[in-house]
Amino acid sequence: MAVLQMQKVSICALKRDRKEILEKLQSLGVMEIFQLPDEEEGFEKISTQQERSTFEKNAALADSALDILQEYVPEKTSMLASLEGKKLVEKEKYLAAADKKEDVMAAASEIVSLQKQIAEHRANIQKLENQAEALTPWLGLGIPMNFKGTKSCAVLIGAVSGVLTMDELYGLVLGEEEISGVDISILSSDRDTTYIAVVCMKEEEEKVENALRQGGFAKPSLMMGKTPAEEKKELEKQIRVLFQEIRNCQDKIAEHEKDRMDLRLISDYFRTRAEKYEILGQIPQSRKTFLVTGYVPKKAVPALEKALNEKFLLSIEAEDIKEEEEAPVLLSNNSFSESVEGVLASYGLPKKGEIDPTTIMSFFYVFLFGLMLSDAAYGLIIFLGCFFAVKKFPRMESSLKKSIKMFMYCGISTLIWGILFGGYFGDAIDVIARTFFHVDVPEGGMVKALWFVPLNDPMRMLIYSMLFGVIHLFTGLGIKGYMLLKDRKYLDFFCDVVLWFVFLIGLILLLLPSEIFASIAQLEPGTFPAAVSQAGKILSIVGVVGLILMSGRSSKNIGLRLALGAYDVYNVTGWLSDVLSYSRLLALGLATGVIASVVNQMGSMAGDSVFGVIVFIVVFVIGHIFNMSINVLGAYVHTNRLQFVEFFGKFYEGGGKPFSPFKSNTKYVDVKEETYL
C-alpha cells in the first residue's frame, strides 16, 4: 500500500559517452526522462528526426516482412498463444542479430518486393480474366474481331439492345430501305443484349449500320486480330503463366522462414534505436558534455549511480521532489494487492497527497466479487483455470498476469462463499440425486450450507449485504480521516469525518430497534434495549447539530454558513443511496443460484434414462458455461462500480500521472537485462 517515493536525478557526462550512457539508461529502465523547460546556457538540442525516421522505417519494413511470412508461412501457435508473452532472449543473441542487420534488412526488402510482385500479378490476372469473360459472348465468331470484310463485302460485328429473333433483326435492317444481299448471324444473347455478325455489300454498309443503330447497335471494345476463341486461349495461357509466377514468389517467400526470428530481433532493435534517438533530441548538449534529467524511484537511485559510476566519468545529483511539483506515480504492493492495480489505474492513479488505496481495495474487491458469484463449483473452475494460466505462462504480459491473478483470488473467494451458501452448480447435487438415483433429498440439501442458503432466506442476505456495504463505506470515510490527520488538518478531520461518523452511527442505532428493521431482519420487536434507541437519538442530534454549525465554516456569513451546513446534512440521502447500492450483492448472488437451478431443472426434464442422461449432460454443460460467463461479467462490472462510485467517492480523486521510464519497449522479444525495480 505505497506509492514509491520519486527523486529528480540529473546526470552530466562527457558527450563522447552519450550513446553508451543512454543505452545503459534504456536497459536499466528506471528513469523517466523529461525535457528541461529552458535550455541551459552553453547547451543546445540537436535534431535527430532524420535518424529516428530511418530507424522507424526499418522497423516498419521488418514488421511488414513478418506479416507477409505469417500470411504465406503461418507459424503454428496454440489457442493460448496470447498468454505466452514475449520470448526472452539473451543479450548476446540480440546483439548478434544487430551485427548482421544489413543482411536481415535485405531479406525483409526481398520479402516485401516479392509480395508487391504477387499483388501486381494478381491485378494482372484479374484484368486478363475480365478480358476473357468479355470474350464469352463472341466465342461463336469464326473470324477476328477486327475483320472489316472483303473487297466487295463488309462485315459488321456488334451488339443490339434486347433479345431479338432473326426475323426481328432482318426487319430492323431491311425496314423501308431497299437493301439486298444481307446475311445476319446471331452469335449469342443474354437477357438484355443480342450479339450479331452482319455481312452486306460494301456499298450498302452505311445503310445497314444506320438501320442497326436504330436498334441500339454498338461495336465491341475488343478489336483483336485473332478469333475470340483463339484470343481467349491466349489469355488463359497468360493467366497460367502469372499463377506460376505467383507460386514462384510464394516459394521464395517461404525460403525466408528461417529469417523470422532475426526479423523480430532486428525490428525490436530499430524500434529501441528510434526511442533512444528521440531522447537524444530532447537532451541539452554542449561541445563536450550533455545533461539528462528525469524522475527515478528513490530506492533505485543507488543502483543507478553504481551502474553508471563504475564505467563512466560523470556527475549524478539526486534531490527530493519539490512540494509544488507533481511527480509520476509508481505503485508498490504485495503479490495479492498488486493484482487489482489495473482496476485502480482504470479509475486513476493517486495524485500528490493521496494514499494508495490498492491494498484495502483488494480485500474488499475479492470479498465482494466472491459474494456476488457465490457458487463453489464456479469458484473452483475459475481458480484452477487462472492458476494453470499463471503457472503455465510465466512470461505473459505484466498487466494481463495481474488481471488473471485477480480473477484467481476472486475464484478462491467465490469457492469459500459457495461453501458457506451451499451452492455447487446451484442445486445440481440435489437434482442429480433425486432424478437419477431416486434419493429423497433431506431438507437443506444433500450438502448442507455452512451458513445459510440465500435463495431460502433472501431478507437475511439483504441485511448482510447492507452491513457489508456500511463497513465498506465507513472504511472509505476512515481513510479520508487518516489523510486529513496525515496532513495535520485536525479541524477538517473533526468536522468532515468525526461528525459524520457520529451522525450516521446515530441513525443506524435509531433504525435497529424500529419495526421496519425488525420485519426485514425477521426479529421480534424489543430485541434491542431502549438504550440503543436513546443512544441513537443523542448521537444523531449531536451529529446533525455539529454538521449544520461546522460544514459551512469557511463562510463568515452566519446565514450562509447554516445554509451550507443544512445542505451538507441533506447529503445523508446520498449515503442512503450508497448503502442501497449494496443490494446488488443480493441480486447477483440470487441470479447465479436461480439460473443455475433453472438449468438443472431443464436438464432433468427428460427423466432417468440413457436419453435423459445425455440431455442432462448437454443442458448442464451449455447452461452452466453460459451462467458462469454472464455472472462473472456481472460480478466484475458491479464490483468495479462499488469501488469507483461508493468507495472511492468517500475519499479518493485520482488523476496521478503514471511512471513511464525510458526503456526498451520491444514488440516481439524481451532482452535479458539487469532489473532494478
Image (cartoon, rainbow, N blue to C red):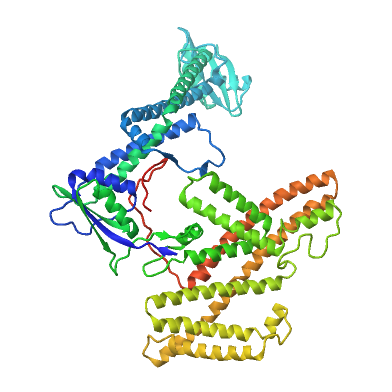
User: Quick check: 450 above or below 90?
Assistant: below
Residue 123 placement (x, y as % from top left): 45, 27
Q: Judge whether residue 60 can be spotted in this image.
A: no
Q: Nearer the viewer, residue 482 or 606?
A: 482
Q: Is residue 223 left or right of residue 102?
A: right
Residue at 38% of width from left, 80% of height from top?
A: 489
Q: Nearer the viewer, residue 357 or 266?
A: 357
Residue 659 placement (x, y as % from top left): 36, 57
Residue at 29% of width from left, 44% of height from top?
A: 23
User: Quick check: 125 above or below 500?
Assistant: above
Residue 63 placement (x, y as % from top left): 40, 36
Q: Judge whether residue 385 can be spotted in this image.
A: yes
Residue 606 placement (x, y as % from top left): 83, 49
Please identify the quadrant where the N terminus is shown: bottom left
User: Quick check: 515 above or below 157?
Assistant: below
Q: Is residue 192 left or right of residue 145?
A: right
Q: In the rendered image, which quarter is residue 258 located in?
A: top left
Residue at 69% of width from left, 73% of height from top?
A: 460
Q: In the rendered image, which quarter is residue 65 located in?
A: top left
Q: Is residue 584 left or right of residue 338?
A: right
- Residue farthest top in this picture: 151
Q: In the rendered image, which quarter is residue 595 located in?
A: bottom right
User: Quick check: 478 above or below 381?
Assistant: below
Q: Nearer the viewer, residue 117 or 535?
A: 535
